[in-house]
Image: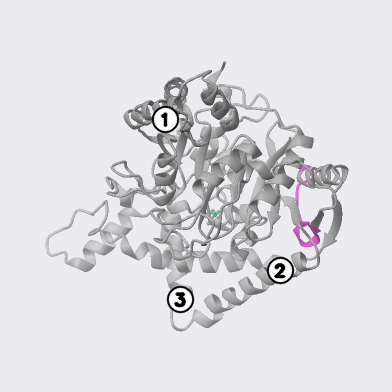
Amino acid sequence: MNLTELTIAGARDALRAGETTAQALTEAHLEAVAEAGALNAFVHHTPEIARAQAEHADARIRRGDAPDMCGIPIGVKDLFCTRGVPSQAGSRILEGFKPEYESTITDKLFQDGAVMLGKLNMDEFAMGSSNETSTYGDAVNPWRAGNSDASLTPGGSSGGSAAAVAARLCLGALGTDTGGSIRQPAAFTGITGIKPTYGRCSRWGVVAFASSLDQAGPMTRSVRDAAIFLRAMSGHDPKDSTSADLAVPDFEAMLTGDVKGQVIGIPREYRIDGMPEEIETLWARGIEMLRDAGAEIRDISLPHTKYALPAYYVIAPAEASSNLARYDGVRFGHRAKLGQGDGITEMYEKTRAEGFGDEVQRRVMVGTYVLSAGFYDAYYNRARRVRTLIKKDFEDAFAAGVDAILTPATPSSAFELGANFTPIQMYLNDVFTVTVNLAGLPGVAVPAGLDKRGLPMGLQLIGKPWAEGELLNVASAVEERAGFVDRPAKWW
Ligand SMILES: NC(=O)C[C@H](N)C(=O)O
């Protein structure tokens, strides 16, 4: 058995059947991680923790007391606080920060027996779409275009998570998604990623970027794995007042693959100018797959879509400017060296100028500006009103009988690292994904084909609030028909 080729479902079943052990799985993955330095996916390695967790998991499996994630080697995005383990959110300003507490999500996973191999690379404070704003340097996509050896982005901000899962360094990884950070990298690396409904998973102990938009989710190599992983992460947490007090369904049991009679909406506003033909064709193929599976395809309108990106890039920086005020050189991580006569103001200024990268500084400035007294109504309040309209567009579609919405996940496949996009060009990566965060809905990206260069492309499905199970079921129908089995050739 090739242990790094298993899915989470396959590994779980093999562990329970005694065909392998958590320790063997862990060693195989630690070895894969050690060989994959060129991908720069893992930025902190925790082999001692992994080995201790695996030993413990094996004992539980032998006792017949093994939850689904017991003994499963995973990677954790650096945005999650993990007790005693560096948790830097990809930023220099959190250099040396080792939390004294565990995030609720990692705690839940560890309670279930999951094995943490280490922390994964990401854009600084989750701001970016290419993993190029990370203080650790770029994570690299394991996929390459044709015969070219140019390094491609795995997407962002959960770039390390996507690269690690696609390269078989772990069976699944934790990501977070504020405007597309799970779904875009999943699409760029040919894996599955779901952003759950806002409130499905606790945000406690996840470094905050934009609190009304942030949501954690799993990144995996199959829809079934996403269902298993998501169930283990979900649930109410009294420590996060925005987490929902709702029962968590068995998402895996809902994967029947049957979508007969379901109404799938195709929003005409997502047919944007300049959309590459290959993405358009992929979308058309997705429509055919679902029609073929017995779903009813319906053209719909989500009229405020075009205002989503500008509204997101007002609301997210506004919240970020407030959340990031706490990094002052006193409470966490990095503090600048001070000169003679420097007072507390210089300490704040120098620390923040050194500790934050350009993109983070840009967002703090934009955010502070749109919240300032003279501009609050013109920008922040207007963006909030747009957000309400976007949410209402989706509500109207669902009220008219639509069960799920199909769109492309991204407007392109993976691009080269160092492409030197302007900030606006970079933000355009999120054009199909931010609406979902603004509306608080669940969205899943599934790999559905390769482009002419041999790079993966993904489709996005958007669901009703709390309907992750139904949504993953539609995704599984696409997965089955797309038959995406391609994988990156190993060059690292
Ligand atoms: N965090 C995210 O979901 C990524 C998004 N591209 C942003 O930079 O805000």
Cβ of mark 2 under 8 Å from ligand 1: the answer is no
Residue 463 is drawn in which quadrant? bottom right
293 relative to 391 in the view: left or right: right
- Of residues 38 and 21, the one nearer the viewer is 21
Circle nearer the viewer, 2 or 1: 1
Dot 3 amino acid type: Leu
Disc 2 target residue:
395
- Of residues 306 and 400, the one nearer the viewer is 400
For the residues bearing labels 3 and 2, Cβ distance under 8 angstroms = no
- Residue that sits furthest to the front in the current view: 63
Secondary structure beneath dot 1 equals helix
Q: Residues within 10 Å of mark 2 (few under 14, many from 20)?
A: some
Residue 302 visible in this rendered orientation of the protein: no
- Residue that sits furthest to the top in the current view: 1
C-alpha gap between disc 1 and disc 3: 52 Å
Q: Is residue 271 magenta?
A: yes
Q: Is residue 326 above or below residue 357?
A: below
58 relative to 223 in the view: left or right: left
Secondary structure beneath dot 3 equals helix
Q: Which residue is at 51% across, 20% downward?
A: 18
- Of residues 428 and 115, the one nearer the viewer is 115
Q: Magenta residues? A: 266-278
Cβ of mark 1 under 8 Å from ligand 1: the answer is no
Kindly identify which numbered label has been placed on residue 363. none
Circle nearer the viewer, 1 or 3: 1
Disc 1 target residue:
60
C-alpha gap between disc 3 and disc 2: 28 Å
Which tag, 2 or 1, sits closer to the chain's start?
Answer: 1
Percent of width and height locating residue 225: 60, 37
Q: Residues within 10 Å of mark 3 (few under 14, many from 20)?
A: many
Disc 3 target residue:
371
Q: Is residue 256 above or below residue 269?
A: above
